[in-house]
Image (cartoon, grey):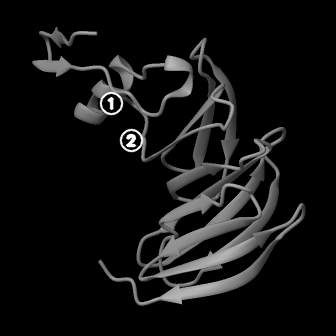
Amino acid sequence: ATGQALPAYGVQVQPVVIGAARGFLLAGWLALNLACGSLFAGPPIIALAFSPDGKTFASAGRRVIVLRDVEQTNRVTTLETDLPKITSLAFHPAGGLLAVAGGTPGVNGAALLLRLNDGSEVARVTNETDVAAAVAFDPAGTQLAVAGNAFVRTYTVTSERLLPRHQLTGHVG
């Protein structure tokens, strides 16, 4: 697809491909939001993720995660959290859970494990000193890694909680 100019704003919009979920392009609205976030009433989009089956797309910024149907692009549901800033999203490989990282930079943070069917919180792990920056599942979905300021913590994922495994320190980039 070719870019289109928006004369009133002087912005060239190019399609943006994020993942290969069923050939879906997140084009105009995402490119425009990234280029001219001030044009939109809502907060900026900070975190993005596709579900393992490629049918659902999640986006988040402050306190809210929006799940959309990839084919129709319509909003499927909204999940609310108490995290002032959401920095990372990761779908569980089996698809029923969503890991969410965030918090308040320089103050505190947390990683949440949410059920997709009702948005309920399965588990929460906290970082008392800074925002949780990123979350990632291993391919089997049995472990979750949570990154913070100069550390990574790993957890065993169970149906009802996250069990601490390891803390890796010393990665300052």
Tell me the CA gap for discs 1 and 2.
7 Å
- Is 122 left, or right, of 3 in this rendering? right
The quadrant in which the C terminus is found is bottom left
From this view, report whether residue 131 is shown above or below residue 70.
below
Q: Secondary structure at mark 1?
A: helix
Residue 171 in percent (x, y) is at: 39, 83
Between 85 and 3, the one nearer to me in the picture: 3
Q: Tell me the number on the disc at residue 82.
A: none
Residue 142 in percent (x, y) is at: 77, 63
- Earlier in the chain: of badge 1 and badge 2, it is 1
Q: Report how many numbered discs are placed on residues in the image.
A: 2
Residue 133 in percent (x, y) is at: 47, 66
From this view, report whether residue 98 is shown above or below residue 11.
below
Determine which quarter of the picture holds residue 77.
top right
Residue type at mark 2 is Pro
Q: Residue at x 83, y 38 (%)?
A: 117
The quadrant in which the N terminus is found is top left
From this view, report whether residue 100 is shown above or below residue 23.
below
Residue type at mark 1 is Asn
Q: Residues within 10 Å of mark 2 (few under 14, many from 20)?
A: some
Between 132 and 78, the one nearer to me in the picture: 132
Q: Residue at x 42, y 47 (%)?
A: 46
Residue 10 in percent (x, y) is at: 10, 18
Between 155 and 34, the one nearer to me in the picture: 155
Q: Secondary structure at mark 2?
A: loop
Q: Tell me the number on the disc at residue 33.
A: 1
From this view, report whether residue 28 is shown above or below residue 110.
above
Q: Residue at x 66, y 38 (%)?
A: 52
CB atoms at circles 1 and 2 under 8 Å apart? yes
Tell which residue pokes out farthest to the front in this image: 140
Residue carrying label 2: 44
